[in-house]
């Protein structure tokens, strides 16, 4: 017998043995990528929540410059904004386009005030009225955290945890609330809330992460409410955490008329 047929038969026998052994040993576990944290993919829901919340309580306020795009059923608008946001109570935005100021927006815990500087009128209304101008989860008690991408699953539900090669997926008992977590950064990259029918009621996407004052934060935040065809995209150009002496005054002249926010004409 020549050496070549003998070599080939031995090689085939070795490959067959290896395949047989692998099939008997059960499914192979995909090793975690080298940049994954220790413990991945075996973190519990409580472990993930704890790691997501590290350093979050230290952020009490922020100031930012941002590019904001808002899409509603009627139109799409894009503008620049100077943002001031305090965790305890208020969000202020000074909006402009091509360097010309268009208005000043103030959100409190239950009300919205918009000083339309072009028409010289102050719009006032309940908080939900702002959805046509800025369709973010403004009525959520975690609105501040959503704007910075610092959300985490709560403790009121029993969360199921699954993983692929690079992400954790957390779902509530009825799978209506779902979080996708990037353990390389310990940040939520996607949140969905679904109706009983399974349709997505609201969605939040966080991306373009960078480190700001020692905390990993997204540079791009997307809010969507698909059924209402509402979408708001916030792209931060710069961001400062816990700045001193934040001002939230609209500085409305005393002679400016006051009208309901819903009255747009």
Image (cartoon, rainbow, N blue to C red):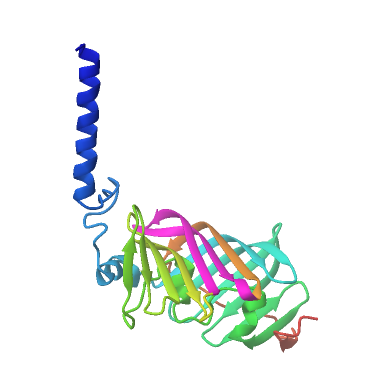
Where residue 116 appears, as percent x and y from the top left, is 72, 76
Query: Closer to the camera, 95 or 188?
Result: 188
228 relative to 14 in the view: left or right: right
224 w.r.t. 126: above or below: above
46 relative to 114 in the view: left or right: left
Where residue 137 appears, as percent x and y from the top left, is 53, 76
Where residue 235 appears, as percent x and y from the top left, is 55, 58
Q: Judge whether residue 216 is colored magenta.
A: yes
Query: Closer to the camera, 69 or 58?
Result: 69
Residue occupying image coordinates x 42% and y 75%: 175
Residue 227, visible in the rendered structure: yes
Judged from this view, the residue extending furthest toward the right is: 265
Residue occupying image coordinates x 22% and y 53%: 26
219 relative to 153 in the view: left or right: right
Q: Locate the N terminus by quadrant.
A: top left
108 w.r.t. 15: above or below: below
Q: Locate the C terminus by quadrant.
A: bottom right
Residue 163 falls in image quadrant: bottom left
Characterize the magenta stretch by its predominant secondary structure.
strand
Q: Judge whether residue 129 is colored magenta.
A: no
Judged from this view, the residue extending furthest toward the top is: 2
Residue 2 falls in image quadrant: top left
Q: What's the magenta region? A: 199-227
Residue occupying image coordinates x 63% and y 78%: 131
183 w.r.t. 203: above or below: above
Residue occupying image coordinates x 41% and y 68%: 179
Residue 245, visible in the rendered structure: no
245 relative to 129 in the view: left or right: left
């Amino acid at each position: 017998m020549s050496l070549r047929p003998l070599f080939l038969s031995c090689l085939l026998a070795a490959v067959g043995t290896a395949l047989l052994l692998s099939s008997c040993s059960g499914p192979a576990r995909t090793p975690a990528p080298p940049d994954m944290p220790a413990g991945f993919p075996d973190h519990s829901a409580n472990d993930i929540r704890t790691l997501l919340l590290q350093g979050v309580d230290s952020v009490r306020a922020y100031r930012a410059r941002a590019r904001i795009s808002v899409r509603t059923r009627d139109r799409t608008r894009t503008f620049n904004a100077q943002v001031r946001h305090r965790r305890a109570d208020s969000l202020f935005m000074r909006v402009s386009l091509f360097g010309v100021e268009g208005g000043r927006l103030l959100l409190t815990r239950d009300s919205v005030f918009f000083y339309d500087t072009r028409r010289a009128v102050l719009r006032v209304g309940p908080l939900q009225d702002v959805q046509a101008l800025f369709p973010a989860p403004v009525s959520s008690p975690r609105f501040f955290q959503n704007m910075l991408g610092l959300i985490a699953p709560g403790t009121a539900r029993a969360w199921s945890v699954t993983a692929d090669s690079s992400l954790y997926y957390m779902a509530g008992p009825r799978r209506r609330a779902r979080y996708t977590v990037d353990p390389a950064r310990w940040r939520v990259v996607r949140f969905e809330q679904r109706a009983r029918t399974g349709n997505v009621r609201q969605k939040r996407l966080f991306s373009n992460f960078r480190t700001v004052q020692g905390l990993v934060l997204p540079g791009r935040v997307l809010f969507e409410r698909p059924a209402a065809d509402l979408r708001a995209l916030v792209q931060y150009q710069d961001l400062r955490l816990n700045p001193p002496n934040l001002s939230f005054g609209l500085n409305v002249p005393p002679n400016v008329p006051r009208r309901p926010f819903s009255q747009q004409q």
